[in-house]
Image (cartoon, grey):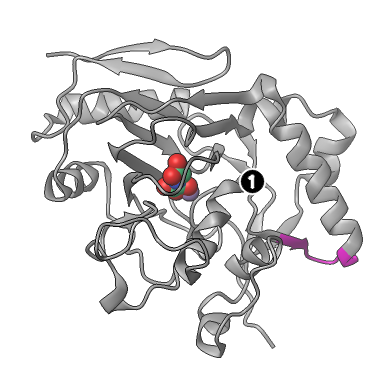
Amino acid sequence: MPITVRQIHRHFVGEVSGADLTRTQTPEEIESIRDAIDRLAVLVFHEQPFTDEQQIAFTRQLGPIENSAGGHIAKTHERRLGALMNDVSNLGLDHKPLARDDRKRMFNLGNRLWHSDSSFRAIPARYSLLSGRIVARSGGNTEFADMRAAYDALDAATKREIEDLVGEHSLIYSRGSLGFEDFTAEERMMFRPVRQRLVRTHPATGRKSLYLSSHLGTIVGWPLPEARAFIRDLTEHATAPAFVYVHRWRTNDFVIWDNRQTMHRVRRFDETEVRDMRRTTVAGDAPTAAQVEAA
Ligand code: OGA
Ligand code: MN
């Protein structure tokens, strides 16, 4: 059955009907999903009751899966889900909400900040695919911001100024901005900063977007306070209400977003309740900037 896509925001976001992603897709179906993501940057599907295996199988049809290693602080024996799944729930191994001061919970609170997934990796993520297995009763919305529309709305002088700028991204910056700083030496090594361009061009559509993220901590060649102040200005501009779509989750909703053209964040909810969200990620294919080895 051909899928139907209805744009539900002025700038981006398609709501898709007629798809059953739990089964193998035809090449034509994959092609139309890909085209829709390129164009609309975020796709919302309802009624997709995935198992982890089915979610992984569908994700593989869109491209190679990014391994979650190197992007979190949970030790292998502390992980609730397999290595190809990102656990963005608020749950521990016992399927109960983590304690308020649990280190993993405090680290995961970084998802409340606007970000692009894996911008802290030298080769950052392409798509993220998030399955709402058990959603919050109230709150816990995920918000998305269109970084192409935000780029387009900049004045010409700012566009010229930022065209070739390169930023440094790290989980140490995003978590540090919330006051989470007790990283082990091993984690500091794992999370050492990587370089990303501030302006990206989408390979399929040629549209430019602002490549911002909470992980972005400085701009190469700029004094630190000036870089931080400018990053705040750009982020404030890019996440103005006109560029934002708010997703209110229903059970078994499935949202795919293109990290090359959007940012997202989760909002507060009652964390004594279970919110079981599971993400798979399609890996990117190239760095956005040349990397330098930390001195
Ligand atoms: C993510 C993420 C937000 C949420 O999965 O990458 O940031 O709503 N999740 O849980
Ligand atoms: Mn995320």
Q: Would you say 236 lies left or right of 63 here?
A: right
* Residue 1 lies in the magenta-colored region: no
Q: Which residue is mark 1?
A: 211
Residue drawn at the location 64% of the way across and 61% of the way down = 174
On the image, the x and y values in percent for residue 218 come to 77, 62
Instruction: Name the residue furthest left.
Output: 23
Residue 147: which quarter of the image? top right
Could you say which is closer to the camera, residue 269 or residue 5? 269
Residue 71 visible? The answer is no
Instruction: Name the residue furthest front.
Output: 272
User: Magenta segment range?
Assistant: 217-224
On the image, the x and y values in percent for residue 168 come to 68, 64
Residue 227: which quarter of the image? bottom right
Q: Secondary structure at mark 1?
A: loop
From this view, report whether residue 227 is shown above or below residue 8.
below
Residue drawn at the location 46% of the way across and 23% of the way down = 40
Could you say which is closer to the camera, residue 65 or residue 105? 105
All told, the count of numbered labels is 1
